[in-house]
Amino acid sequence: MPPTPGLYVGRDAVVNDWVEDGFGRMKNLRAVPTSVNRQPAVAFYLWREREGAYLPLTIDVLRITGEAITEIVIFHDDRFPRLGLPERLPAYGTE
């Protein structure tokens, strides 16, 4: 699947969406650091009550220039198995 289209221009736009809005909406989110094509990435899992586990959501691949993140490319959950990532994460305290 191709990356998710979208565009944020500037640090303030990213901070506003992810830090002020996004993380508040995503209380049941877990992040696992990884890499894709030698670039840093984060695999996000979302809690699914019905399955009793965290299931794949997105993989965010980061482009770093100097000391700043200059691009984030988001792929959907179908990439997890190809990257050797777990298909599910257990609930906290049961690992």
Image (tube, rainbow, N blue to C red):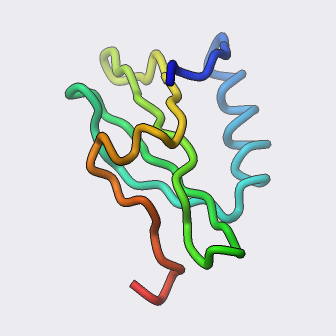
Horizontally, residue 54 falls left or right of residue 83, namely right
Count of number-bearing discs:
0
Residue drawn at (52%, 28%), measured in percent from left and top? 74
| Residue 90 point in image, percent of width and height | 48, 77
| Residue 39 point in image, percent of width and height | 27, 27
The answer to whether 15 is drawn above or below residue 7 in the figure is below
The answer to whether 88 is drawn above or below residue 35 in the figure is below
The answer to whether 44 is drawn above or below residue 28 in the figure is above
Residue drawn at (43%, 23%), measured in percent from left and top? 69
Residue that protrudes farthest toward the left in the picture: 38
Residue that protrudes farthest toward the bottom in the picture: 94
| Residue 67 point in image, percent of width and height | 34, 24
Q: Closest to the observer: 80 or 34?
A: 80
Horizontally, residue 87 falls left or right of residue 67, namely right
Residue drawn at (34%, 21%), measured in percent from left and top? 64
| Residue 77 point in image, percent of width and height | 51, 42
Residue drawn at (42%, 43%), measured in percent from left and top? 42
Q: Closest to the observer: 30 or 15?
A: 30
* Rendered-image quadrant of the C terminus: bottom left
In terms of image quadrants, where is residue 46?
bottom right
